[in-house]
Image (cartoon, rainbow, N blue to C red):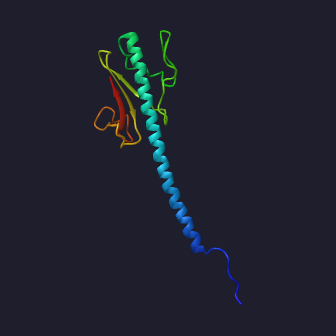
Amino acid sequence: MYKLARGFTLIELLVVISIIGILATLVSANLNSARGRARDASRKSDIRNIATALRLYYNDKNSYPVGTYFDSLWGLPWTDTGVTYMSKLPGDPLSDQTYKYEVGADGNSYTLSACLENSSDAQGVSAAASPYDVWCPTTKWMFQIKQ
């Protein structure tokens, strides 16, 4: 009489391992996409907070800071003549790339920009064929607030 073999065949094991590998790849891809969207949400929130602080600055000074004002302040407190406008001027959550701040020639307007990872973000605008093309090289998509 023959013994019954217990266990799995090699083919069954390979099929199960292949299915697990495919599922892991799909989950990983979706997780990376979700992380990118979360970082984009953080960027947009940062830009809105900076815009609020800029309005406070404008109310005090009747003009916005010069264009190079923030170059050395990213990641540090924004204090001017004893007034703290932000306890920490935020930077990009992923890299050491900073947000872009430009002030109009008259000092009464500005543009704040952040590169986005998700190029299908409904609040984003294209950076292609603009001065920001080089600044947002990966997705060429950015979020802006103009005042």
Residue 123 picture quarter: top left
* Total numbered labels: 0
* Picture coordinates of residue 100, whole percent (x, y): 39, 28
Q: Residue furthest left?
A: 129
Q: Nearer the viewer, residue 11 or 37?
A: 37
Quadrant in which the N terminus appears = bottom right
Q: Is residue 47 left or right of residue 7?
A: left
Residue under the image location 44 percent in, 33 percent down: 43
* Picture coordinates of residue 147, whole percent (x, y): 32, 22
* Above or below 16: residue 109: above
Q: Residue furthest bottom?
A: 1
Q: Nearer the viewer, residue 58 or 127?
A: 58
* Above or below 77: residue 137: below
* Picture coordinates of residue 97, whole percent (x, y): 45, 32
* Above or below 70: residue 10: below
Q: Is residue 138 left or right of residue 10?
A: left
Residue under the image location 70 percent in, 87 percent down: 2
* Picture coordinates of residue 140, whole percent (x, y): 35, 39
* Above or below 19: residue 48: above
Q: Is residue 29 left or right of residue 141?
A: right
Residue under the image location 50 percent in, 53 percent down: 27
